[in-house]
Image (tube, grey):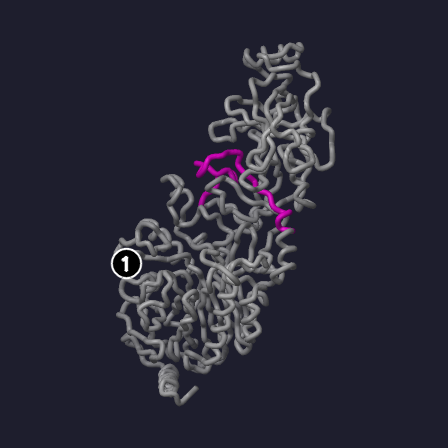
């Protein structure tokens, strides 16, 4: 090993017992052990005091994008091995560079910063030796308690396990991702709210560690994970695994983080959760219904502008919108669905410039949207929608919606039957109040039971929904009702249990199992996106499958251009369905199984991507849109029956 003259002088002076550059007592004389600095309490017992220490540098982060310092650890021969007490320390030294393996003698003041203990360096360290190594501590997840991590604060550690990537949300922004021993589950997705969910949450908190990139910069030019770097074609997904994890453990930004040692072997990622194509239809399926939260699909004013509207929650420019739309259309086409329920689409009506009309048109000439005959569907900036393939299904009866209250988005219901069949299914798309706490008070505030804010409002909406559906609002006798959409409630939460008590069974739980998920939040996976079936329909469902194209994907691969330079915008983007939203679509395969004839579908709803709209009020019957096809006798009979039923209700003759 070659040393520059300055380092050689420091080393000679240190080894001869002569203080270097006034650095204090000579190397090898008594110094304060790091264990006494760290202590067994949350803060250092020596905080505010000046100390003299001698320890080995384990990793240097003094570069322009680093942390303005380096980590040191007590040499193996001098370690005290006190249970629960760390023997590593961060040295804040913005003007000094160190090198891993150097044994340094230094002094400074003990401080508490960013949740961890550090030494603020005074003067210049003395170089006592080079090429020293320390033995990494062994750490495994989950840990027994929070003190188990504090016991290794500032120390070099290695994790002998194969760990799981639980979240990638901050990967491109900060170069970090969350690791755990197996996947973490949303507490109220697997346990009842309250004490049971709290126990799951507590276990999750002991089973998580952030793998960072050793830098403080934002939006790095190259994200190191996975090697050789993150891109649209080289993602790391939640559910992938990683081995060979080692680094320095520290607490920063309220999270325990592992900082990689520069020059050390990088962790190895394994594609344990690879991308897949859309699930194939289950054998015997003749109707596929899908649910898809399209993450604020706003088309501005419909003329290439208007993206600066205060109500716009989606793309901020036409260029962003085109990127978003390309991804959504790719995903929607791949679903191979006959009926699709959408959430978070711009609530701007059903006219020529509307978001729903544009999206439907992009799917092709056979696709239609359901028009409830209203200027807008409720007062929120976003709404639900129903679209369908007019070549495979026929809407019967009338479209229906329900104004619940001023906090709840309106559901939309429509009854469909397969072309050539007589049995019909009523599809109801929903998007209940979010868990965000803005404006929440009283019972709607977070009660600490795991269900978040606005839970009573969601319960009220679920009750109103069940009451409404008991009246057959579409005016058609059907083979059952299918409730789909983002209920903003996990599987064990009160709104879902209320709907179960009213006869709507959780088909995700039945077919996808206890580990089903469609959404990842704070590293925990669960499903807000539901498929709930009435008893008659539940017997006909053959499969329910979330397609994991979004929840597991890094947020960097979405359409947004914010925080990215031109190179990053190109590297992270592909016009495919992956990370087209933050929720996974859910596919429901139904076997109606009563073929009648093979007559082509009529096109009774508005929403043709070609012909103009045919307004339909919530109490009106469907009308052919001029598509030129022969009317389906069964559809016409259903229309007449629905019209008679509505007339009787409107005149008060039927309650």
Quarter of the image where the C terminus is located: bottom left
Assign the magenta stretch its main secondary structure. Answer: loop
Would residue 633 be seen by someone viewing this image from the given angle? no
Residue 505 screen position, x and y as percent: 56, 71
Quadrant of res 76 = top right
Q: Is residue 416 above or below residue 312?
A: below
Quadrant of res 565 = top left
Left or right: where does residue 645 sit relative to residue 278?
left
Left or right: where does residue 248 sit relative to residue 574?
right
Could you say which is closer to the camera, residue 351 or residue 554? Answer: 351
Could you say which is closer to the camera, residue 256 or residue 296? Answer: 256
Identify the residue position indicated by label 1 in the image.
Answer: 302
Residue 479 screen position, x and y as percent: 49, 79
Residue 272 screen position, x and y as percent: 58, 49
Magenta-colored stretch includes residue 211: yes
Q: What residue is drawn where x is 31% and y is 69%? A: 375
Would residue 243 be seen by someone viewing this image from the given angle? yes
Residue 431 screen position, x and y as percent: 45, 64
Could you say which is closer to the camera, residue 135 or residue 431? Answer: 431
Magenta-colored stretch includes residue 93: no
| Furthest residue in direction bottom, as rendered | 653
From which residue to which does the magenta span run? 203-232
Q: Is residue 340 above or below residue 138?
A: below
Q: Residues within 10 Å of mark 1 (few under 14, many from 20)?
A: some
Quarter of the image where the N terminus is located: top right
Q: What residue is drawn where x is 33% and y is 74%? A: 605
Q: What residue is drawn where x is 50% and y is 37%? A: 224
């Amino acid at each position: 090993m070659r040393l520059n003259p300055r380092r050689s002088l420091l080393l000679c002076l240190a080894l001869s017992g002569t203080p270097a550059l006034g650095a204090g007592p000579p190397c090898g004389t008594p110094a304060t052990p790091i264990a006494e600095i760290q202590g067994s309490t949350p803060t250092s017992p020596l905080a505010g005091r000046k100390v003299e220490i001698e320890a080995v540098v384990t990793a240097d982060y003094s570069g322009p994008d680093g942390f303005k310092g380096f980590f040191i650890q007590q040499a193996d021969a001098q370690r005290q091995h006190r249970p629960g007490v760390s023997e590593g320390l961060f040295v804040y030294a913005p003007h000094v560079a160190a090198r891993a393996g150097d044994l340094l003698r230094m002094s400074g003041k003990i401080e508490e910063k960013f949740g961890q203990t550090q030494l603020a360096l005074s003067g210049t360290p003395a170089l006592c030796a080079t090429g020293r190594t320390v033995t990494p501590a062994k750490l495994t997840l989950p840990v027994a308690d929070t003190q188990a991590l504090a016991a290794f604060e500032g120390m070099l550690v290695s994790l002998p396990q194969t760990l799981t990537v639980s979240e990638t949300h901050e990967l491109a922004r900060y170069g970090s991702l969350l690791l755990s021993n197996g996947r973490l589950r949303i507490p109220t997705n697997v346990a009842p709210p309250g004490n049971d969910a709290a126990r799951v949450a507590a276990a999750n908190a002991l089973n998580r560690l952030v793998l960072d990139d050793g830098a403080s910069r934002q939006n790095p030019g190259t994200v190191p994970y996975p090697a050789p770097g993150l891109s649209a074609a080289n993602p790391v997904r939640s559910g992938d695994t990683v081995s060979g994890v080692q680094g320095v453990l520290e607490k920063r930004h309220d999270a325990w983080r592992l900082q990689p040692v520069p020059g050390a072997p990088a962790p190895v990622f394994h594609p344990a959760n690879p991308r897949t194509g859309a699930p194939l239809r289950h054998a015997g399926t003749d109707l596929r219904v899908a649910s898809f939260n399209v993450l604020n699909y706003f088309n501005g004013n419909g003329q290439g502008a208007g993206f600066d509207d205060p109500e716009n929650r989606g793309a901020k420019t036409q260029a962003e919108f085109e990127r978003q739309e390309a991804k959504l259309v790719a995903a929607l086409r791949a679903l191979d669905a006959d009926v699709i329920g959408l959430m978070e689409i711009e609530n701007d009506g059903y006219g020529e410039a509307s978001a729903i009309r544009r999206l439907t048109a992009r799917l092709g000439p056979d696709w239609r949207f359901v028009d409830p005959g209203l200027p807008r569907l409720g007062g929120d900036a976003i709404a639900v929608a129903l679209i369908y393939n007019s070549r495979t299904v026929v809407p019967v009866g009338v479209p229906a919606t329900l104004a619940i209250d001023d906090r709840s988005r309106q559901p939309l219901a429509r009854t469909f039957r397969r072309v050539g069949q007589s049995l019909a299914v009523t599809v109801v798309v929903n998007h209940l109040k979010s868990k965000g706490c803005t404006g929440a008070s009283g019972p709607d505030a977070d009660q600490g039971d795991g269900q978040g804010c606005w839970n009573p409002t969601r319960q009220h909406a679920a009750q109103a929904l069940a009451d409404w559906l008991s009246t057959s609002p579409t005016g058609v006798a059907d083979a059952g009702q299918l409730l789909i959409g983002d209920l903003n409630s996990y599987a064990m939460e009160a709104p879902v249990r209320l709907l179960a008590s009213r006869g709507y069974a959780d088909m995700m739980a039945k077919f996808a199992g206890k580990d089903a998920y469609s959404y990842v939040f704070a590293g925990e996976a669960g499903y807000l996106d539901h498929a709930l079936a009435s008893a008659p329909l539940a017997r006909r469902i053959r499969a329910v499958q979330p397609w994991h194209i979004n929840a597991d994907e890094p947020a960097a691969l979405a359409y947004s251009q914010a925080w990215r330079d031109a190179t990053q915008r190109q590297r992270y983007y592909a016009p495919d369905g992956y990370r087209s939203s933050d929720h996974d679509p859910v596919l429901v395969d139904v076997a109606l199984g009563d073929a009648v004839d093979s007559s082509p579908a009529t096109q009774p709803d508005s929403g043709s991507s070609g012909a103009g709209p045919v307004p339909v009020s919530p109490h009106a019957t469907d009308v052919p849109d001029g598509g030129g096809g022969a009317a389906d006798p069964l559809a016409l009979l259903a229309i007449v029956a629905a019209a008679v039923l509505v007339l009787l209700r409107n005149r008060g003759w039927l309650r």
